Amino acid sequence: MAERPLIYVLNGPNLNLLGQREPELYGRATLDDVEALCAERADQCGVAIDFRQTNHEGELVTWVQEARVMAQGIVINPAGFTTTSIALMDALLACDMPVIEVHITNIHRREEFRQHSYVSKAASGVIAGLGVTGYALAIEALSELLEAGE
Ligand code: CA2
């Protein structure tokens, strides 16, 4: 049987707190729940995932560089690095593969400082405001892009 395409699902700072604080904004699902949701959708779509979270910008950049050689696509919620990290944008721009940016909340309805994303410059698509379902949708979209050879 052919090996399944590998998608890195990367999460930025403070997302380890999901489900523990601010449920009115981010919902009640924990990051473990999100990983299970992603694994289930990946299975249905015939892809494999490597799911990770870090609070460190350099580690996230290193993982993106790793994905460049190990994976066929990236789903990323850059969290607080969305609006600040040129290093993350540069690492993603160096990846010749589809990248989908996910935000649990609709960043465009929130404070102005959340609305500019460096990461979007390197993304094939952006999903925001659909809660953690956005992760599953991103995996589905990415698997379709890979199938179509894009
Ligand atoms: O909506 C999103 O997914 C965000 O990427 C989440 C980031 C925020 O900085 C972005 O503007 C939008 C924050 C992640 C922090 O997650 C927490 C979860 C629960 C409790 C506290 C923080």
Image (cartoon, rainbow, N blue to C red):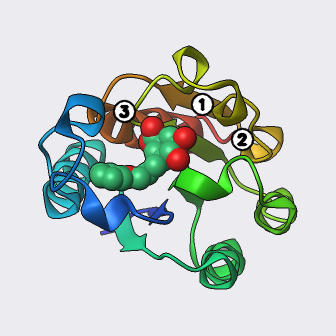
- Provide the secondary structure element on which disc 3 rests: helix
Give the mark, 3 or 1, whose residue is nearer the N terminus. Answer: 1
Q: Is residue 74 visible?
A: yes
In the rendered image, residue 52, in percent from the top left (x then y), is placed at: 39, 73
Q: Ligand 1 closer than 8 Å to the CB at disc 3?
A: no
Give the mark, 3 or 2, whose residue is nearer the N terminus. Answer: 2
Q: Is residue 143 visible?
A: no
Task: Give neighbour class at mark 1: few <14, some 14-19, many 20+ (Cα, 10 Å).
Answer: some
Give, as a three-letter code, the residue at label 1.
Val
Choose between 141 and 37: the one closer to the eye.
37
- Provide the secondary structure element on which disc 1 rests: strand
Task: Give neighbour class at mark 2: few <14, some 14-19, many 20+ (Cα, 10 Å).
Answer: many
The Cα–Cα distance between marks 3 and 2, rounded to whole angstroms, is 15 Å
Q: Are marks 2 and 1 in contact (CB under 8 Å)?
A: yes
In the rendered image, residue 112, in percent from the top left (x then y), is placed at: 69, 25
**Tag shown at residue 78:** none
| In the image, farthest residue toward the top | 109
Give, as a three-letter code, the residue at label 3.
Gly
> Mark 1 = which residue?
126
In the rendered image, residue 31, in percent from the top left (x then y), is placed at: 23, 60
Question: Looking at the figure, which quarter contains the N terminus?
Answer: bottom left
In the rendered image, residue 102, in percent from the top left (x then y), is placed at: 50, 40
* Residue appearing at x 69%, y 28% in the figure: 115
> Mark 3 = which residue?
134
- Provide the secondary structure element on which disc 2 rests: loop
* Residue appearing at x 54%, y 22% in the figure: 110
**Tag shown at residue 123:** 2
Q: Eyeballing the image, is 66 above or below 73?
A: below
* Residue appearing at x 59%, y 34% in the figure: 148
The Cα–Cα distance between marks 2 and 1, rounded to whole angstroms, is 7 Å
